[in-house]
Image: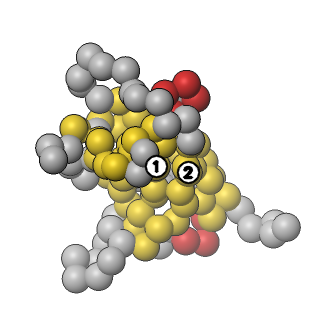
Amino acid sequence: MSNEPVKTIGGTVHYLEKIALLPNSTLYVSLLDVSLADASAKELAHQVTPHAETAGLGFNLVYPMADVLPGHSYAISASIKTDGKLVFITAERHSVELGVDHVKGQKILVSRVNH
């Protein structure tokens, strides 16, 4: 195990609809470096929570401080799938400042996907 310094960013995912998640729902949360507009975002950390309908929608992402670069932009992305089908996803960028201690308690809004 590495002795590399790490930080944690945590919070909850929520949606506005007044409905319960269906059985077999899974929550996916990722911490991304979104600095480059012409390249895929680099994932710094992720969490998968199976059975989110009973486990809840909380998350704690642990990321290495070595991945936090000056001048870069970071965001949290979340989605909820039921039986592998996308049901909710973040519709707007949820930017975060990394490397500081006051970023706990993030509230990530996801929106219903229209199929």
Q: Position of residue 82 (x, y in %)?
A: 40, 41
Which SS class for mark 2? strand
Can you identify the residue that label 2 sits on?
Answer: 47
**As shown in the figure, which amino acid type bears the numbered disc 2?**
Gln
Contact check, label 2 and label 1, Cβ < 8 Å:
yes
Q: CA distance from mark 2 to mark 1?
A: 6 Å
**Most foreground residue, 28 or 22:** 22
Q: How many marks?
A: 2
Q: Is residue 21 shown above or below 68?
A: above
| Residue most extreme to the bottom | 38
**Most foreground residue, 35 or 70:** 35
Q: Residue at x 56, y 51 (%)?
A: 47
Q: Position of residue 24 (x, y in %)?
A: 49, 37
- Is 71 left, or right, of 12 in this rendering? left
- Is 56 left, or right, of 78 in this rendering? right
Can you identify the residue that label 1 sits on?
Answer: 28
| Residue most extreme to the left | 114
**As shown in the figure, which amino acid type bears the numbered disc 1?**
Tyr
Q: Quadrant of the N terminus?
A: bottom right
**Most foreground residue, 26 or 7:** 26
State the image quarter where residue 113 is shown: top left
Q: Is residue 99 shown above or below 21?
A: below
Mark 2 or 1 closer to N-term? 1
- Residue 2 in sight from this viewpoint: yes
Q: Residue at x 41, y 63 (%)?
A: 32
Label 1 environment density (alpha carbons within 10 Å; few <14, some 14–19, many ≥20): some
Q: Position of residue 49 (x, y in %)?
A: 56, 42
Q: Position of residue 88 (x, y in %)?
A: 29, 41
Q: Residue at x 53, y 56 (%)?
A: 46
